[in-house]
Image (cartoon, grey):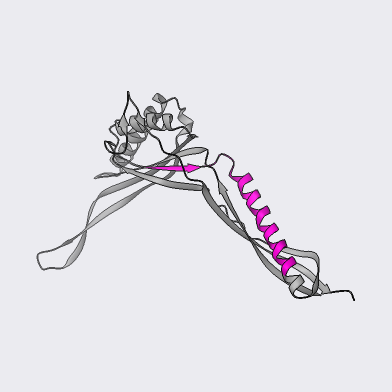
Amino acid sequence: MREMRVTGRGRLFVKPDRIRIMMNLSDTKKDYDRALKASSEMSTKLQKVFAGCGFSEEDLKTTHFSVDASYEGYSDKNGNWKQRFVGYRFEQSLKIEFESDNKRLGTVLYALANSGVKTEFRIQYTVADPESCRNELLAKAVGDAAEKASVLASAGKVKLGEIIRIDYSFGNSDIVSEPVMLRNMKMDCAAQEAGGSYEFGMVAEDIQINDSVTVCYEIMPLET
């Protein structure tokens, strides 16, 4: 049986409808217990900040947490490079998501900026239903493969038969765009303070996603 393999590519522009705020907490303490305590105190403060903005405790998710020994390099009196222990460093990553709303975003960022918690903020835009977006994208990729196969079969003067198999490497990449990063902010230049909030006029760009599938078709000679 003769075969023809064709790779179809799909492209989709998705309008984001969700805002995700990613936060990173970190500090170094001399003792392991103090590092754990500092992490707990900072994350508890964040929970209170979001509770004041109308979120529940379960809305704030921890995506990563670690405590590791920290060292610094130095040169001794003989010029030899050495390392010395400085303490225990914790790192905690958290996220919270909500429906795309610049007014609520301004309220949340104002509360975070004035919380006293030193953290790095990243604003991401994403979608509430990524699975339906991926399914639509795959349908486009298969359709592209069918169109290419038809053109190739016509050019090669063969008849296109049934699909033998479809090869696809599933990828679960996040559908997200990240237009803004804010570090230890007071946001004096990034936005204008307005009654316990910041005024934002950001419109998120559509997110471009791509995927591909390889379709194997049976091909036969043209009937004469």
Residue 106's spot in the image, x, y percent?
Answer: 38, 31
Of 164 and 136, nearer the camera is 136
State the quadrant of the N terminus: bottom right
State the quadrant of the C terminus: bottom right
Residue 8's spot in the image, x, y percent?
Answer: 65, 62
Q: Residue at x 75, y 75 (%)?
A: 156
- Residue 81 visible somewhere in the drawing: yes
Q: Residue at x 72, y 71 (%)?
A: 152
Of 43 and 216, nearer the camera is 216
Q: How many marks?
A: 0
Residue 102's spot in the image, x, y percent?
Answer: 43, 33
- Looking at the image, is 207 positioned above or below residue 149? above
Whether residue 143 is in magenta: the answer is yes
- Residue 45 visible somewhere in the drawing: no
Of 150 and 24, nearer the camera is 150
Q: Residue at x 32, y 40 (%)?
A: 119
Overall secondary structure of the magenta section: helix
Q: Quadrant of residue 121?
A: top left
Q: Residue at x 36, y 31 (%)?
A: 199
- Looking at the image, is 134 positioned above or below residue 213? above
Give the side of residue 176 with respect to residue 154, left or right: left
Give the side of residue 10 with respect to residue 3, left or right: left
Of 4 and 199, nearer the camera is 199
Give the residues in magenta.
122-151
Residue 6's spot in the image, x, y percent?
Answer: 69, 67
- Looking at the image, is 199 positioned above or below residue 144? above
- Looking at the image, is 135 positioned above or below residue 119? below
Whether residue 120 is in magenta: the answer is no
Name the outermost residue toward the left. 77
